[in-house]
Image (cartoon, helix red, strand yellow):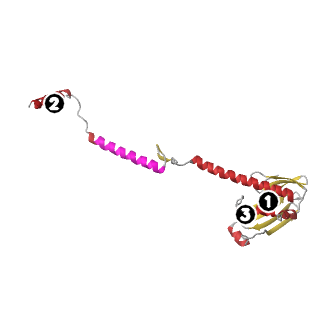
Amino acid sequence: MEDNDDMVLLRDAMDRTTDGLPPLPDLAPFAVREGRRRRARARFAVGAAAFGVLTVGALGLTLLPSPGTDVAGVAKHIDAEDEAERERATEHQRKTAALLDELLPAKVTDIRPVEGQVAEYRITVDGRPFIMTVSVRPMSASLIQDCHCEKDTKLKTVQIVDWADFKAAQYWYGKSRVTLSVFGWGTAVPLKARDLSAVTGDPRFMELVKARNAHPLEPEEPLGGGLTRPRTKL
């Protein structure tokens, strides 16, 4: 009974203390909203982990690379492949230039690879500059079928050109068209077509052809491709 009197007195005191204060808010709606926000945040976190980092902007969401994507690593891999390809091209040009220097007539006094053009060389003949092309270029699949040369072990002659300002010897081998040519651009070339074809008879030249046929350094020639002018100008 005494305890009950104390509880009554406590409630009266609390009522007097809270007189004039606004009523307590209803906490149920707040709890519902907070629960929804937490679920939304959880879903957003799962989406971000699955699809990458999401940046929220005024016009929506922008998808960025996922955290696991090593962009720098991919770039380094591509750079390494490009560097390896450049080294292969440089080595091929060096070997070809050395072989041409040995096999071409003595009147050819200088042979220099053209940087960036794997099939082209600056040569000096009787003191005059020319551009020489030594190309092992992949052919289209249809042309390979027409020439029946995919399994050939020797060069198959396509054409020999011995004009005053243009000398050329062209062959088929495997999947490739092999071309040796010198353009004069209106100036007489002091070489013979047989000087170019003589190069192809050397076993070392055939080794270069076989290597380039198996692992090309030039793009596939366009349809109807044949003898073309070099890209490099004197």
Q: Looking at the image, can residue 29 be seen?
A: yes
Secondary element at image label 2: helix
| Foreground: disc 3 or disc 1 | 3
The residue beneath circle 2 is 11
Query: If you read the primary sequence from the N terminus, does the residue marked by circle 3 or circle 2 appear first?
Result: 2
Residue 134's label in the rendered image is: 1
Q: Tell me what residue is drawn at x 16 percent, y 30 percent.
A: 11
What amino acid is found at the position of numbered circle 2 in the picture?
A: Arg
Magenta-drawn stretch, dominant element (helix, strand or loop): helix
36 part of magenta stretch: yes
Crowding at dot 1, Cα within 10 Å, few <14 / some 14-19 / many 20+, comes out as: many
Residue 112's label in the rendered image is: none
- The picture places residue 202, in percent across and down from the top left corner, at 83, 63
Crowding at dot 2, Cα within 10 Å, few <14 / some 14-19 / many 20+, comes out as: few
Q: In this picture, which residue range is highlighted in magenta?
A: 29-51
State the count of labels. Answer: 3
Q: Tell me what residue is drawn at x 79 percent, y 56 percent.
A: 95
Asked if 37 appears above or below 226 in the picture, the reply is above
Q: In which quadrant of the rendered view does residue 161 lie?
A: bottom right
40 part of magenta stretch: yes
Asked if 13 appears above or below 192 in the picture, the reply is above
Secondary element at image label 1: strand
The residue beneath circle 3 is 213
What amino acid is found at the position of numbered circle 3 in the picture?
A: Asn
- The picture places residue 153, in percent across and down from the top left corner, at 76, 69
